[in-house]
Every structure is written in C-alpha cells, then in structure tokens.
Amino acid sequence: MKKLAVLITSLALHFSSFSQSSNPVFLETENFQNKGGWVVDQQFMDLMGSSYLMAHGMGVPVADAETTVEFQSTGEYTVFVRTFNWTSPWFDGEGPGKFQLVVNGKKTKQVLGASGSEWLWQNAGKVNISSTKVKVGLHDLTGFNGRVDAICFTKGNTPPPNDLEALETFRKTHLGISMTPEKAGHFDLVVVGGGIAGTTAAISAARLGLQVALIQDRPVLGGNNSSEVRVHLGGRINVNPFPALGDVVKEIGPTRGGNAQPADYYEDEKKMEMVLAEQNISLFTNYRAFAVETKNSRITEVHARNIENAKELTFSAPLFADCTGDGTIGFLAGADYAMGREGRSEFEEPTAPEIADKMTMGSSVQWYSVEESNPVAFPAFRYGVEFNSSNSEKVTMGEWTWETGMNFDQIYDFERIRDYGLLVVYSNWSFLKNFSPNKNEYTNRRLEWVAYIAGKRESRRLLGDLILKEQDITNYVVYPDASAPTTWTIDLHYPAPKNTEHFPDMEFKSIAVHKKIHPYPIPYRCFYSRNVDNLFMAGRNISVTHVALGTVRVMRTTGMMGEVVGMAALVAKRNNTTPRGVYKNHLDELKKLMNKGVGKYNAENMQKYNEGSTLGPKE
Amino acid sequence: MTNFKKYLFQVTATVGFFLFVSFSNTFPERPKTGFWAMEGKLITHYFEEKTDSLSGPELFELQDKNGLPIWFGRHIFKDVCISGECKMIRLWLFWDGTGSYLGMQIPDGEPLTKSDHTEFQQEDYVKLEGILRDTASILKALKQEDLIIVPDSIDPYEVDGYTAATQPTLAEVVVKDAVYSCHTLWHTVYGPVQNEINTVLENNLSEKFLANMFASQNQGYISRAIKCVAAHPEYHSAFYPEIMHLVKSDNSALANQALSYFRPEILADTVIQQQLVLVMADTYMNMKYEILWKFIGLGKVNEQVVLELLNMFTSQEMGVGTYNLILRLVTPEHISGNEQIARILSTLSQDENGYVRNLTKKILNKEQ
C-alpha cells in the first residue's frame, strides 16, 4: 500500500447494517450510522474494551444517534445496554448522564446511564420487534456525558459477558469480525501516535524516502495541539547545535498561540494536509494500536483497531516508533519503563523527592465560555463536589491549570481522571450560573467548549540507553549524541495549595514550578528502547526522569524529537541496523541529517509564541 | 472695644491667620524649573476632590501651539498616615496628554521623607518614579491596612507602622521605609485626577484635536486618538484611513492597535476590506497573518479580498503557511462568481507542491 489509506469516518459511515446471523443482535454504538450529537470516545478502550458514544452536550441534550439494524427474526427481545453512572465515584445517587434507548421511534421506559459504578450491562427492558429492519437510537436527556458502549438484543435473559476477554470474543463473534486481523501492509517504519511527535516523525522519515505507516486513534492529527485538546505549542525551534531541527514543526505548527481557544486556532487541516501531501505516508486515522507481536526482543507487528467499526489491521515493519504518549507500544512489547517520581537517591536529582512515589503531572480538561446577547441557563449540577462562594473559581474559562489526577494512575484511572475534570467544570459553572452571589455576571455566558479528550502530560516513560536526568540539563552535560534541543524550563506541576485547602486529595487546579535552563540538546539515546531492539520513541514517553520530563514535554520539543527519529530510521534502514546501531556505528550519518533538516517548504517561522523563558545559549 | 468685639476680633484674626497659613500651604509658588519651565499655553481647570481638598482645586494643563496637551499638573499636598500618625507630603505630579503618569517635581527644600524621618535619596526618587509608572503595580490591589505585617511575637496593639516590617514581597517593589508614601502616591496618580484628565480630554475632542493627535508623531497621542475614534463612531469616516495607514507602522504595538480598530462591524464594509487587504503588501509577516486571522474572524469576505490574497500567495508575497488560512475564506460563490479566482485555484490544483495541490483540490471538490 503506497498511498494514503485514510480510513476515517467515511468507512464507518457506510450503510453498515449488521448482518446478524443469529440471536443475539449486538450493536457497537460507535458504529452507528448517524451519530447525531454524540461523540466517539476511544480514550479508555484499553481499559473497558471498546470505544463508546458519549453525549457531550455541556448541559444541553445532544441530538439523537441512530442506526439501522437487520434482525434475523421478529419477536420479543430483552435489551441490554452497556453503560454506567460516570459520577458514581463522587456521588451515591442517580447520575446526570441519563439517556433512553429508542427502537423504531419509540423510547424505552427505562432511563439509563444514571446508575452503576462501573461499565456493566444494564437491562433496558423488553421490546417487540415486528420487522427485520429496525431503527435503533440513543436519546440523550441531559447533555451531561451519558455514555453507551454497546447494545444487545436477546431473546434470552442473559446479558453478554462483562469480563473483557470474554466480551472481546463475544464482540467479534456477533459483529462478524475476523479473528485474524487484515494486513495493512509492510512498511519501513510504523509510527504509532499522530500527535506532534508522531506526525513529525512520519513526515521526516517519509521525506527521506521511507515507506511509513502513521497510526492515529483520532480523526485529527496533532494530539494535545489538536482542536480536540487545544494546548498550544511550546518551546523553541531552530536553535543550536542543529538549527535545521524544527523545520517540520514550523510547517505544521499553528500560526497563533493560546490554550483553550476556538477550534480554528489549531489549524487541524494544516497538519492533516501536510501529512497527506507526503507520498510515502500511509495514514490510518481512527485506528488505535492495542497489541503487538514480538520475536527475539523485536516487534514484528502492531495490531490496531478502528475506533468506530472495530475493524482490525496489522502493520509490519523492521522499525517502529512509539509516539503514543503513554508508551503503549513499548509497554505491550515488554519495554522497560518508569512511571511516577524517582526518589532522590536514584539519580541524585536535587528536585526529586526524598522517597520515590507514583505522583505524576496531571491531565487538563480545558474549557471556555462565551458572552451571549441573551440570558443562557445552565442546569443545577451537584454530584458530590460542592462549590460555594469561598471555593469556587470565579472565571469564564479554564486552561492548563485545570489539571487533575496527579495522585491517580494516568493509565488505569484515566477515565475517572477525565470524568473528574468534567465534573468540576460543570459543578463550578453550575454554581457560578445558579447560586453564586455574583451570578448576574454570568447570566449571559454560555459554556461554549469543554474538552472531552483530556490533555495528558505524563504517564509511562520508556527507558532507553540513556535516561536523561536533571543534572544533565542544569549542568549542561552535552553528550556525543546530542540532538533535538529542549528549551523550556524544567516545569513541574503540583496540585495548587489553595485548591488542596478546599479539595484535599481531589484537586483540580495546579501550579507550575519552573527552573530555568540553557537550551540543551537531548541525547539521541533517549529516543530508543533499551530492551526492545527496534523501537524508537518520540514525545513525552522518551527516556527521561520525571524531573527531566518537566522540560522536554512541550510540543515543539517533542516535534523535533520526531524529526530526529525519522532521520534515525533512515540511517537504521540504510545500514540494516537497529536504533542502537545508529548510535554505536552511524552517529555521523545522523548528525549530517540533523544538520540538513527535512524542511520542504521554506515555511515562514510563525512559531514565536509561547517560546518560554530561557537562560539563553550556554557560552 | 466691648468684650464681644474683642472676641470677634480675636476670632477673625485667628481665622484669618489660619486661612493665610492654609492658603499658602495649599498654593505654594510654582517652581520655575522642570515641567514648569516648559513653554506653552497654561490652562487652568478647576477640579474639586473632596478626599484631597488640601491639594487645591486646580488642575493645570500646558498646551502646545496646536492645542495638544504637553502635560497636566497638579499640586499634591496630602497626609500620609501610619497607625494614626500622619505627616504631610508636598509635590507636583504630572500626567501626559493621554493621562499617563509623566513625572513629579519636588519643591525646593521640601524633600520627601521616610517613616524614620530621613530624607529620600536620589535612588529612592528613581525607585519611586518606577513605581508610579507601573500601571499594574502590586500596590493597586492593596489597601493601607495590607501594608504591614505584624510579627507574631509582638502585641499588635503596640505596633505601629514605623516598627512593623514591610511585607517581604512588597519590600522588593517599594522604597524602603516609605511604603505608605509609595502607596498614597500610586493611588493619587491613578485616582480621581486621572479621571478628571480623561474628562478634560474628552471635552476637548474635536476633529481638529484628533487630527493633531494623529499628526503628533507621539505614540501615546496616536494611540489615544485611535481609542477616541473607536469610542466615537462619528469620527470614523474622517480618520479610518489614517488608522488603516498605521497598520503598516514599524511600531508593532501601534500597528496591532490600529488593526484591532477594524472590528467586524467596521470590516463588514467591503470597501474597507479591500483597502485592508491592499495594506498587507507593505506589512511585516506577522501582521500579514494577523490581518488574515482578522478576515477569518469576519467569516465572509468580499471576492476581491480573496482574489488579492490568492494573487499574493501565487506571487510568493505570502508563504505556504498562509495558504490553508486563505482557503478558509473561499466560498462557493467566490469560485462560481469570479473567473479569476476559479482560474487561480484551478492552476493551484495542479501545483507541484503536494500540500498546496491537495488543499486546493479539496476545496474545489467541496464546492462542486
């Protein structure tokens, strides 16, 4: 497959009525033909087994989702719906995510989404199916993030399994999905993750002549810099010792900065078209990697599943790049990794805590409101976190400081972390709009946007031949494999003390503690796994300590990492060697490429915003 | 003389004496140096400020030959109180013709003093000047009672401002041992006098006055003039070309302010849109992008704007980074209604640059 296989939504939107061979009739909601106002959320499919549809209406019920299904036989069916009350960690009563099932235009009696503390099958009652072609819909009642994974019509009374492995088999069986994934092709390099690092890695390698597959689990590229998360780029490009690094970042980067701004700021189309313009990139949007095949400490294949139609593909290559942020590919392949904060004794870092712990930086659920010309109502929203005059945030928008989950596991607790981000935005806004003494100031304000894709800062860090630590940077220890520069401060986030006073162990606001640095070239050895022989990394999951992550994690820097990884992939291919082999035997080749860069369009440098403070070049 | 007459005489004499003393304190002789030595026409505005009555009712304005204010000046004579103990400070404060703080003048022989009664030194005056110029000073949000911290070990009722320490964060930004003076003066500079100056300026507003402001070569005046025109739409037609011209200014702050004048309701005028797009050729890259974003914010632009932008792109006056933004402005009507636009896009759909080619094809396909 040479050219683009943009198997995006259009594939899933085909009239894909399920051909159900037998009872039961099983529907994945993310595969609904008409999603109405519901959104596809794939962020937690590794945890709960699937992507799902969510009614993200920010307090306004969203339009119905609908699909047409063919049944083998008519008659009475019991309907089971996989859902839960997403506020259950904080609130014992009925949750706000209420919705109803609609069958052939008729709503079922049961209100769903308001109960249950975990994903499980809930009985939605019985329906009579009188013809084999059936319209099934989801009717949102609140706009408050009701969610549905799947729906099962059965003539029996037994719900489908909830155990993930059994459910996986059940899904495949009843959706007619092959147990053997289809081959997407063989590539020179498979890049997993289409954030800024993955996108630049793919472009870099493709421009150097490699055949590249770029796998991204969303319909857009850019990750945290996409219009779905809306964090602006940070850091400096085109600085010594390799000023050509950053040329691709310059081409794909949005021309104006700002967090939590309107969607068009983030220029999704620019990133997408820059990738599509590369003949050597096969782009697979809406595919999430979920498994790998390995042989002798090498990855041979990555398996990915479409987040809407569940179709599975395998990608084979001699080289892989993990740009997932979570280090998913490395983790699946058994790569060494770290997570949380190292104790001071481990690397003697001055900023590290005395004792190692699991704390990480958090994830942001950003939001903003707009002023309307008429009053806009917002429902009372009280689900376990009470806001009042002294603890509420009297603001009209929330950007990176609305950060949650520092004391939770950013992988396994991620749905809860994201949901808490939503919960506090809604609860605070509800207070400001309905109960605050200053509510008049908010009368005409409307909640315009709340991210449902959380912007994550930190989780797994895959370990390479070198683990970059604080003193390497602060003492300016330049290694022979110096490459992409990190220019941002060592910027570590902690729960905001004032927020802790009001919400102990349930913080949702953060502070940043900065330590200035000189621009520092990150050693190339941080960009490949030390024990998975053909695995590169670029992005926040590279080989650094928690403290060092504080500087390298901003997106212009991760973009330059991607450029270097693309170059190193060429060197590895050309010399039939591994990423480590590039370091050991072909570093000069890599340096030549870093000197030259892979810029193509001589783009104007509009990347002068949010460059961060710096001590300036080291003398 | 009867007792009553004697009493009346004594009272009158006493009141007269105090009146004389008070009057002489309030209206000292004007200095002959510094601001007061500048040439111009002196205008006196009368202004009553009840909380500052000792300073007198006058606000002076020195105008240049075009009637533009060179400065506004006010004699300040007020008390600085610390824990119930007060001292008087006297000085002249000056604001420029836009109401921004300009400087101070201390009467000879009456230096400012600190809480320990020592006189301000040269470096103290320099620091005070810096504080008073800082429109966003930390002092802005502080009340007098916020200015000291009371050590735990000391009974707060026995402590006055002279012995209590200045707050650590505050200490870095105020003149040592003169926090109350700094606070009082900052709030004087940014208090009612400034409001009165704005009122005077507002009352002076006329086409001629604005024309002089624009012609002044003074960034502050020009900036103020832009704000005035924005606040008074009746002057728009006379001055928007002037403001449009300023978009090309080398002074980026002024250029940005000038651009921000062109709000959506003004840019709805397609003539102004076309004028603005022509200005782009003479602007720096950043401003080109800002103007583009301005058009994007407008939602819909005139076809001549689109055509001009496409021409600038094809002639490489605009870089590749602008192309997706330009295409955001292209509508089906532009393509179907303007042959030149259709022709340029058709050519670009065959461009050797794959990025440009794909983007163009996409928009052409979308419009079909």
Image: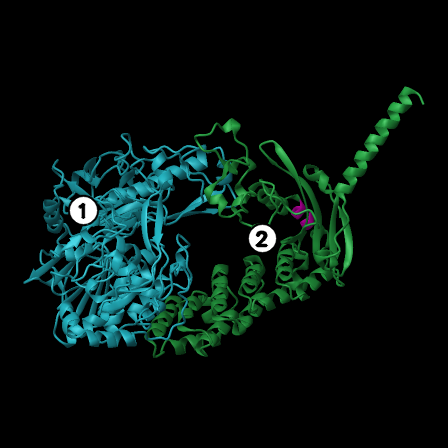
Chain colours: A cyan, B green
Give how far across and how far down residue A424 sits, in percent: 35, 39
The residue pinned by badge 2 equals B133
Where's the C terminus of chain B, which quadrant?
bottom left
- The residue furthest top is B3
Q: Identify the disc placed on residue A47.
A: 1
Q: Secondary structure at mark 1?
A: helix
In depth, the one of A493 and A21 nearer the eye is A493
Mark 2 Cα-neighbour bin, 10 Å: few <14, some 14–19, many ≥20: some
Q: Amino acid at mark 2?
A: Arg
Q: Which residues are magenta?
A: B193-198
Mark 2 belongs to chain: B
Q: Secondary structure at mark 2?
A: helix
Residue A389: image quadrant is top left
Position of A603 compared to A480: left or right? right
Mark 1 belongs to chain: A
Position of A241 compared to A51: left or right? right
Residue A284: image quadrant is bottom left
